[in-house]
Image: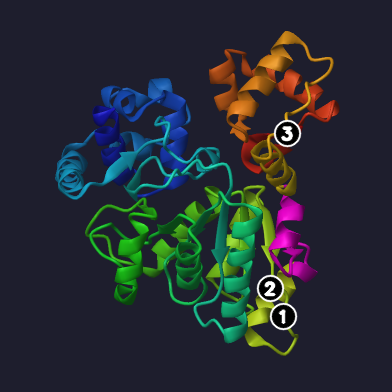
Amino acid sequence: MYQELFYAMALTRLTNFNFQQALELYRAVGSAQKIYEHRMDIGEIVRDCSPRLMEALKDWNEPMKRAELELKYMQEHGIRGLTPSDDDYPQRLRECTDAPIVLYYKGNADLNQAKIVCIVGTRQMTVYGQDLIRCFIRDLRQLCPQVLIVSGLAYGVDIHAHREALANGYPTIGVLAHGLDQIYPYRHKETAAQMLSHGGLLTEFMTQTNADKANFVRRNRIVAGMSDSCIVVESAAKGGGLITAEIAQSYDRSVFAFPGAVSMTYSEGCNNLIRDNVAGLISNASDFVKAMGWQEETQRQQALSDGIERNLFPDLSPEEQKVVCLLQQTNDLQLNILSVKTGIGIGPLTAILFQLEMKGVVRPLAGGMYHLLM
């Protein structure tokens, strides 16, 4: 695993942070180490590999030296490196076409928690936006005790989402537009430190990477991709929060926005998302939970805590029962994880899940996840 991480780090630099190209190559060959081993004949394995990329893949000297330095820093500072082959890599993000082949992570939160929500919006947040975040996270905590809150540690909506998550006992992840050797903005350093023991910090960038403008847009796809849903609190007609919402929609994630008065500058973007059917309108946590279908899980948890036994599922085949038993133990799993843990191939498993959906036993969620209803 160490070797694979090393080669993946070097590969990222070789492809000049062309995320989609790097991921396509990674998936086609099977691992970064195999790409290195076939660096001189990669064109025979990946037929559509561009001549420019084939030439770049021949010289790994500088990228490997840089990877060695980075690994040393990671070991000294308790930073983990995650590749798509790691179980702890965000499963939802892994399915995206431009997912990073390396993530650098410091923290203690489960990046594959059953419910993950990103909260984004303007850096110029108003009192109205602050009230929305405070009430939303407070009420969501009562309705859904286990949720991971994700944002970008920026001014405004981001930092308030992180702080309210911490105040209400939620773990929260800050996705950074730079390496883990710095915190930007520096004023958020104290909050970031708290998040390390109640969530964590995540980035695809090595140390000594500045918070350049382009990196924030790249960061947004991770925020959107690792989440089940994206909530825009406040936004002007243009802004990073809208970019994240558009990316989330392209990943088939659920997108929601809080409306505001037509005269409010920092509600214009949210109102436009709702008008254009990009985002669903929510006014509180209850609206959101109902739209996501999460109240069913909450009710099930309550029933179990009250000692109420679940009814047996009628008319299930042995294979269907195997899937149901697994989801009873760990709900909301992706198709590939279900396949590995049940030992059923993807093709047959897809047919089984379809039958369970027709019987009202499971429901598909965003990101290829399946949710047990009964």
Mark 2 vs 1, N-terminal side = 1
Q: Residues within 10 Å of mark 3 (few under 14, many from 20)?
A: few
Q: Residue at x 37, y 61 (%)?
A: 177
Whether label 2 touches label 3, CB < 8 Å: no
Q: Does residue 354 appear to the left or right of 258 in the view shown?
A: right
Does the magenta-highlighted stretch encompass residue 254? Answer: no
CA gap, disc 1 and disc 3: 42 Å
The numbered disc on residue 260 is 1
Residue 365 visible, this angle: yes
Quarter of the image holding residue 332? top right
Q: Residue at x 66, y 43 (%)?
A: 366
Residue type of the residue flagged with mark 2: Cys
Q: Position of residue 357 (x, y in %)?
A: 80, 29
Foreground pick, 98 / 175 = 175
If the image is split into quadrants, where does the N terminus sit? top left
Q: Which residue is mark 3?
A: 308
Residue type of the residue flagged with mark 1: Gly
The stretch in magenta equals 274-293
If the image is split into quadrants, where does the C terminus sit? top right
Whether label 2 touches label 1, CB < 8 Å: yes
Residue type of the residue flagged with mark 3: Ile
Q: Which residue is mark 2?
A: 270
Q: Position of residue 334 (x, y in %)?
A: 60, 32
